[in-house]
Amino acid sequence: MMIGSGFVGRVCHSMALQSRLGSAGLLRSSLRALGDVTFQRAVVLEDVGKLELKDEYEIFEPFTPDDVRISIATVGICRSDLTYYEKGVIGPFQLNQPMIVGHEASGIITEVGSRAADRGFKVGQRVCMEPGVPDFKSLDTLTGHYNQDKNVRFWATPPANYATQINQDPAWMAGHGCLRESVVHPAAFTFPLPDNVLLDHGALVEPLAVGMHAATEAKIKPGEKAVVIGGGPIGMMCVMTALAGGCSSVLLLDPSSKKVAIAETLGNGITGLDVSGMDEESIKDAVLELTEGGPNVVFECAGGKGPAALSTKYAANGARIIVVACHGEPIPLDVGDLQTKELHIQGLFRYANVYPAAINLLKTGRVNVAPLITKEWSFDDSVAAFDFALNGPPNSVKNIIRVNSDLV
């Protein structure tokens, strides 16, 4: 295998790849490279409510010896993508220039940097990618909490004002994501997929990682009972990771009977409760009855202050409440419940150090993400896919876009 260290070497390498792998569609003919700049098809959020599929979008993306280049196969649509599309802002992250969307992805390696090759990466490997790349020298990274590094370069996330390093970096200042033909990514945050894990499912390792981090931080003990509030993609992932982490039963609360039904197919020990039309007292009583006295762990995945506040009313003594969803306003918690029950509340921000374990769960079948996929979309229909996901039917959980259907 020839590994190009500069522009000429990369062009020669790409020509060889086109000859060897072109029939498999690993390299799209519309992608052009000029030094560290590529011109490729990409889905770009131009402004709030304005999403477009561009034919030749210019992207500045240096390639280093530590990187791999990946032909994108599948990208999942995340709630955060939809929030930027609809509102342009999530907390301190505000859209201020056109940005390529998407951060849940899988693909196939088409180019390998020299040091990445030393780590065992090869052209043709099927991979998924962790979308957040931290400052490797920061204190948060060095102490194992790289997800909290202020200068994390996260796909499809505009840098916050405090992220001074990436605000000055032309390769990252737009916060570009991965809903495009190809990406350059550090090998350290690229993970080979087992042969029995589909590329469509590999793209969902990213939301699964959120569930993994939530279950890990909850410190689940074997046989405990859990409640998950909200049946979106992250809530569904928490349902499965709570079981995989040792819970004997998981109760999902959601106002959609169809999502409740989907959750109950994900494994033994899962029960759903359709809370539509129920008042808070009725929900509390139902949870206490179904969990036989209250859950030991609560995963708040809905993002509403009412359901989050109610969790202290039915949580068992000593329970851990993990706030997974992003909240746009303060949650009014009953401090008396926190004290008398000795409850533990913890926030959660993305994930860290869980991708390998998440992939292992897919490999062994302990977690099955297939039932969560509502619809597969073509790259050409990306904007329609976003509109559907934003205003979809009650049974819509996860929509995926096949950027290169030849790879899937």
Image: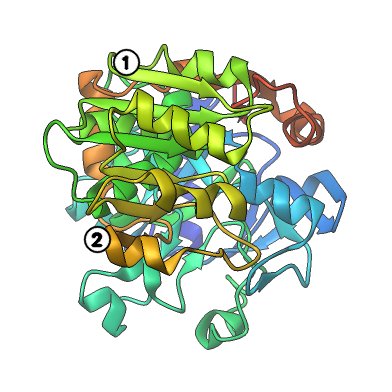
Q: Residue at x 30, y 58 (%)?
A: 352
* Left or right: where 382 falls relative to 218: right
Secondary structure at numbered mark 1: loop
Count up the numbered dots. 2
Q: Where 45 sits versus 199, above or below?
A: below
- Residue 231 at least partly seen: no
Nearer to us of marks 1 and 2 is 1
Image spot of residue 116 (x, y percent): 27, 55
Quadrant position of the N terminus in the picture: top left
Image spot of residue 196 (x, y percent): 29, 17
* Left or right: where 315 falls relative to 253: left
Q: What amino acid is found at the position of numbered circle 2 in the picture?
A: Arg
Q: Residue at x 67, y 60 (%)?
A: 59
Q: Residue at x 65, y 63 (%)?
A: 328
Which dot marks residue 267?
1
User: How many residues crowd mark 1 within 10 Å: few (<14), some (14–19), many (20+)?
Assistant: some
* Left or right: where 239 falls relative to 281: left
Q: Nearer the viewer, residue 124 or 215?
A: 215
Q: Nearer the viewer, residue 140 or 24?
A: 140
Q: What amino acid is found at the position of numbered circle 1 in the picture?
A: Gly
Give the residue pinned by disc 2.
115
Secondary structure at numbered mark 2: helix
Q: Nearer the viewer, residue 238 or 145?
A: 238
Which dot marks residue 74?
none
Q: Where 101 sits versus 386, above or below?
A: below
Q: Earlier in the sequence, mark 1 or mark 2?
A: 2
- The quadrant holding residue 280 is top right
Image spot of residue 224 (x, y percent): 19, 35
